[in-house]
Image (cartoon, rainbow, N blue to C red):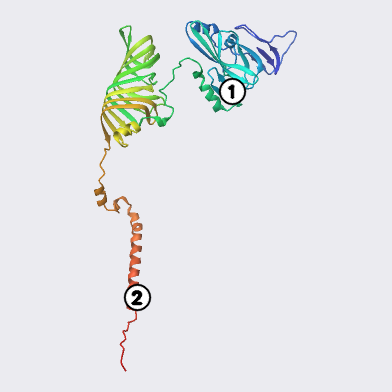
Amino acid sequence: MELAVNDTRLLHENQNSNSGYVGLGYSRIRDVVFDHFQITHPAPLNQRDSSDYISYVKSGGNLVVLNTNGYGTLSDSLFTINTPFIDSNKITTNSGREFLIDTRPKQLSISSENVIPLAFYNSSGGSSVFLGEENIGLGKIIYVNVYPIVTDIAESKVHAQQSYKILGEIPNLFALKLKTNDSVQPNIGDMKIDFKEMTGIGSVVINTTSVILPEDTTIRKLIIRDDHKDISIENVTKLDMDGYHNAVLYGNYVSLANGKGLYGNMLISNSTNISFKGNTAIDAITDNNNSYHFDNITNISILNDELVHVYARQPILNVHGNIVLKSPGGPQILSKVGAYSSELYVSGNVTLTLFMSDSYSYGSNISVDGSMERVPGLYDYDQVAFLLQPFLRFDFNSYSPLLFPFLMIPFVISIIILTGMIIKHDNNYVNKPESHIGTRESY
């Protein structure tokens, strides 16, 4: 804690107390005048105790530590940290891989035989542990010493692109099988379909990881299925669903247009059933401000007088019935219909994986099983009919009457030129001298 008056530091010491008071005291002084008083104290961090992490590892968990903020309790338990820095120019692994990078880490060495170093910062003057692991109980701690690299990036001492490449390789340096998100398509050019609007009528199933109802939603009746019994709540003005990791919506209608990024903007049928996977908590508020809370809910039903407005995160839509796509495009659609169209009608089954949505929606995959009709339709090109058409055609109805005099100017000029040429030719003929054919006389 630090105490200052008029920018003069009067107190600077560590305080271990959780709460209390601090102030100025004086005696035998009548008046004290100052215009600036400041108390500075560090805000406590809401961190879990290191023993919680150790218990997690002992019970079978795998803990990966990236020391982006420096060294602390876990590094002290795994390594011996020496003050001198080393000038490292590469990182080498036990398997022989090398990553070239110039940085100055502190010298880290293992503190016990239980810690296994897997990669090092190397230099001619020594080495420092970059990656180490220790088995504790049923699990393990994997410690990655990235602090020197992160510090150099923040201070612009290294090429950021080179550093990012090394950081991206970290999961491949240890044996944990980390799950990657293969569903993310980083390039919008990889999308298989795009369209402006979609409407589906029939059997509709929407699978998503997050579903949100807007603030202005009103639900005539909400049915909560709790322990095999139904609880009905009428006139719900706010509905929050949380804690689940997957939600499936069932209905008979869906329309999709003008989304919000990763969330598709949809209208679904006024009778919709939603099932959840996970420990789902439901909070509902009615129009008379009555609030309800339910835990461990697996299913709800929405009954409404009009279509229900929802946002769904990167949903997978399956529609079995009649589907209309407006302004469809993308390789998977063009390969089926042959050309761009204003509308595409599908009768059958369509499965669409939505990647993102704005004024246009983009899908990473689409499967179509059924008949398709495009508007306008495809026409056969008739070469003979094209050749029989006039080469030059004017539609005077499409021009303003004021333009007629200007349109006639080329014709008038042509007539004047032709008339002049004819007159000149006639004059030359009239004024041409007569030719005489002489006869030879005998004398």
Which quadrant of the figure has residue 441? Answer: bottom left
Determine which of the numbered discs, if any, sits on residue 428 in the image: 2
356 relative to 57 in the view: left or right: left
Determine which of the numbered discs, if any, sits on residue 387 in the image: none
**Do labels 1 and 2 touch, CB within 8 Å?**
no
Residue at x 29% of width, y 51% of height: 397
Determine which of the numbered discs, if any, sits on residue 90 in the image: 1
Which residue is nearer to you in this view: 116 or 239? 116
Residue at x 51% of width, y 21% of height: 169
Which quadrant of the figure has residue 279? Answer: top left
Q: Secondary structure at mark 2?
A: helix
| Residue 353 visible somewhere in the drawing | yes
Q: Amino acid at mark 2?
A: Asn
Q: How many marks?
A: 2
Q: Residues within 10 Å of mark 1 (few under 14, many from 20)?
A: some
Q: Quadrant of the C terminus?
A: bottom left
How far is the residue under mark 1 from the one under mark 2? 98 Å
Residue at x 53% of width, y 25% of height: 164
Image height check: is 439 above or below 280?
below
Question: Which is more foreground, mark 1 or mark 2?
Answer: 1
Q: Position of residue 246 (x, y in %)?
A: 37, 16
Q: Residues within 10 Å of mark 2 (few under 14, many from 20)?
A: few
Q: Quadrant of the N terminus?
A: top right
Q: Secondary structure at mark 1?
A: strand
112 relative to 9 in the view: left or right: left
Residue at x 35% of width, y 60% of height: 410
Pointer 1 or 2: first along the chain: 1
Q: Position of residue 43 (x, y in %)?
A: 59, 13
Q: Position of residue 267 (x, y in %)?
A: 33, 24
Image height check: is 349 above or below 381?
above
Q: Position of residue 138 (x, y in %)?
A: 48, 6
